[in-house]
Amino acid sequence: MGNLALASKAPLRFHSAAGQQRRAGVQVVSDDAAPMISLSGVCKWYGTFQALRDIDLEVATGERVVVCGPSGSGKSTMIRCVNRLERHERGRIVVDGIELSDDARALRDIRAEVGMVFQGFNLFPHMSVLQNLTLGPMRVRGLARAEAESLAMHYLERVRIPEQAGKRPAQLSGGQQQRVAIARSLCMKPRIMLFDEPTSALDPEMIAEVLEVMVELAEEGMTMVCVTHEMGFARTVADRMVFMDAGEIVEVAPPSEFFREPREERTRLFLAQILRH
Ligand code: ADP
Ligand code: MG
């Protein structure tokens, strides 16, 4: 991770005709100047338990946001609402101009724009790495096998494991599996990548190889929201830090301020705990 300091902060734009076409027919509620992701007044309950309380957050195109906070504070719930793996009950979420609702077409369009990588790798165990990567592009994007395979190999090279293409996931290390999971998401050409603690299930020696791939994505201008407690990564890559506690966003600040002089007592306590380890 020697060149981390070179991470470009200049947001790039990823406008494609395909993106526009995918959205044909869905009401587009914003324009180019609008944020890529916007949550306003978002609330979510699991039964009677309120997991999100009035969440307001805007993420600009090309921006990298790192979300941290204690276990159970609602981090996963918040980012899962962004691609509607969870449904919010109150407030508005708009992703790349599409408001999240029960509309099936809007949902399909959101899923095409937003890639997600979880703690567990969620690869199909009975398929080769290559088959895991070509499945989505062939089924969802309608690519021919040869085209899907060349796309898959391109992204396997990007995550530096092209030689693993023929293996099953169980034959790979955790770090390699997570890089396959990232490559699989990239094969769908998302405009936004969401990461939910992508390194927390990994042995320590494998964390760096996954973070390196994420740093490269950030350098290329991908819009990213990462839930992680890897604070070295956060300092290098994040444009803004978000600290959550008890279903609320407690503090949002650039990393320089966030780590040096957090405004809120709860943030200070949290940072004191995690930075001690
Ligand atoms: P974090 O990712 O910050 O650890 P989560 O978003 O996973 O937090 O969870 C926030 C709160 O919502 C926790 O109290 C958790 O127990 C609760 N929760 C999460 N998912 C569910 C669910 N499917 N059903 C009921 N409660 C849930
Ligand atoms: Mg979580």
Image (cartoon, rainbow, N blue to C red):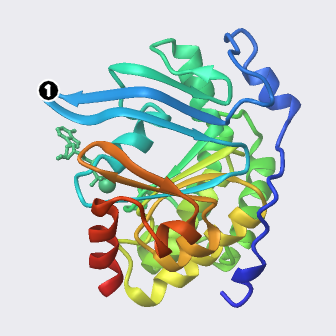
Residue 109 position by quadrant: top right
Instruction: Please count the marks in the image.
Output: 1
Question: Is the CB–ligand 1 distance for label 1 below 8 Å?
Answer: yes
In the displayed structure, 121 sits above or below 260; it is: above
Residue at (76%, 56%) from the top-left corner? 221
Q: Which amino acid does label 1 sit on?
A: Gly
* Identity of the residue furthest to the right in this view: 17
Residue at (37%, 84%) from the top-left corner? 203
* Identity of the residue furthest to the left in this view: 48
127 or 155: nearer the eye? 155
Residue at (22%, 52%) from the top-left corner? 72
Q: Could you say where residue 23 lies in the image, as x and y percent from the top left?
A: 72, 20
Q: Could you say where residue 119 lies in the image, as x and y percent from the top left?
A: 38, 62
115 or 57: nearer the eye? 57
In the displayed structure, 227 sits above or below 104; it is: below
Taking the image in four quarters, ligand 1 sits in the one at: top left
162 or 47: nearer the eye? 47
Residue 173 position by quadrant: bottom left
Query: Which residue corresponds to mark 1?
Result: 47
Residue 273 position by quadrant: bottom left
Q: Could you say where residue 62 lies in the image, as x and y percent from the top left?
A: 73, 50
Quarter of the figure with the C terminus: bottom left
